[in-house]
Image (cartoon, helix red, strand yellow):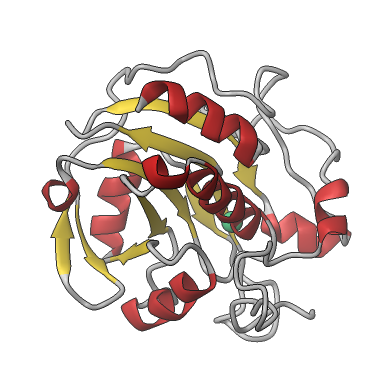
């Protein structure tokens, strides 16, 4: 299989453009699959198997708008992780800031790059107000996503992006706090290090007090995200 062994690299002159070709987005109207309470997971293994982009969603309420079930409901919580510089951080490290948090993994071929691009663009659309928002990427693949790997990956996304990894236990705790589902797909053959990870694809907007303000389903455009966040800042 032609699965990437490195995170995709954008063109030198366009570091903020999507890490996947635009046509990949247009193929996302595949079937739907109820896999997780909160919405969408990245079924990258299926993508590889059936050869097309496949983004299942939960029901029809997902899609391009902020979810109804905003305002917390116990989502979020304390975490202890390691940033891309190898420094231990906690939720308290970011206390006092607005956060946009996304869980994924750097080897993700499509879903994560798409979501991170929309997130970065939303921050940029907010201009100087967006500067008060800290974007955070938390890996669900700590085995491969070392601090060093995250450092490289963050460089391809928003310049302010913080990449966080940790022990499997630390990642598990953080993911559970945000009710993020993830599951490693064992490779069927070949390189044991060449695998995909299914995971929830939701962007969480967290307030300065560390509590969830709202969240965005996969497929929410940067414009809609910026509009909604602009009203909440
Ligand atoms: Ni992904």
Q: Tell me if 157 is positioned left or right of 93 in this view.
A: right
Q: Position of residue 88 (x, y in %)?
A: 15, 67
Q: Position of residue 153 (x, y in %)?
A: 49, 74
Q: Residue at x 24, y 28 (%)?
A: 211
Q: Farthest residue toward the top?
A: 68
Quarter containing the N terminus:
bottom right
Does residue 108 lie above or below 34 as drawn?
below
Does residue 129 lie above or below 61 as drawn?
below
Among the 4 quarters of the image, the one containing residue 32: top right
Q: Residue at x 31, y 45 (%)?
A: 132
- Name the quadrant where ligand 1 sits: bottom right
Q: Residue at x 39, y 77 (%)?
A: 151
Q: Tell me if 191 is positioned left or right of 152 in this view.
A: right
Q: Position of residue 174 (x, y in %)?
A: 28, 47
Viewer-proximal residue among 201 and 97: 97
Q: Tell me if 33 is positioned left or right of 203 in this view.
A: right
Does residue 36 lie above or below 41 as drawn?
above
Q: Tell me if 52 is positioned left or right of 5 in this view.
A: right
Q: Farthest residue toward the front?
A: 128
Q: Residue at x 85, y 40 (%)?
A: 30
């Amino acid at each position: 299989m032609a699965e990437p062994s490195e995170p995709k690299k954008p063109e030198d002159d366009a570091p903020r453009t999507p890490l996947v070709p635009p046509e990949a987005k247009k193929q996302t109207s595949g079937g739907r699959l109820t896999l997780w309470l909160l919405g969408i997971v990245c079924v990258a293994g299926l993508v590889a198997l059936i050869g097309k982009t496949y983004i299942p969603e939960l029901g029809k309420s997902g899609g391009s708008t902020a979810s109804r079930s905003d305002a917390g409901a116990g989502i979020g919580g304390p975490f202890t992780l390691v940033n891309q510089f190898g420094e231990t951080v906690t939720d308290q490290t970011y206390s006092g800031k607005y956060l946009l948090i996304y869980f994924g993994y750097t080897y993700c071929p499509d879903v994560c790059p798409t979501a991170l691009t929309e997130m970065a663009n939303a921050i940029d659309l907010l201009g100087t107000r967006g500067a008060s928002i800290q974007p955070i990427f938390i890996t669900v693949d700590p085995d491969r996503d070392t601090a060093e790997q995250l450092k490289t990956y963050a460089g391809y996304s928003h310049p302010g992006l913080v990449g966080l990894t940790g022990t499997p236990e630390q990642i598990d705790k953080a993911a559970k706090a945000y009710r993020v589902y993830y599951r490693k797909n064992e490779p069927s053959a070949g390189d044991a290090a060449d695998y995909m990870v299914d995971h929830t694809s939701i962007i969480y907007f967290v307030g300065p007090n560390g509590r969830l303000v709202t969240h965005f389903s996969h497929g929410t455009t940067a414009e809609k995200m910026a509009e909604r966040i602009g009203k909440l800042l």
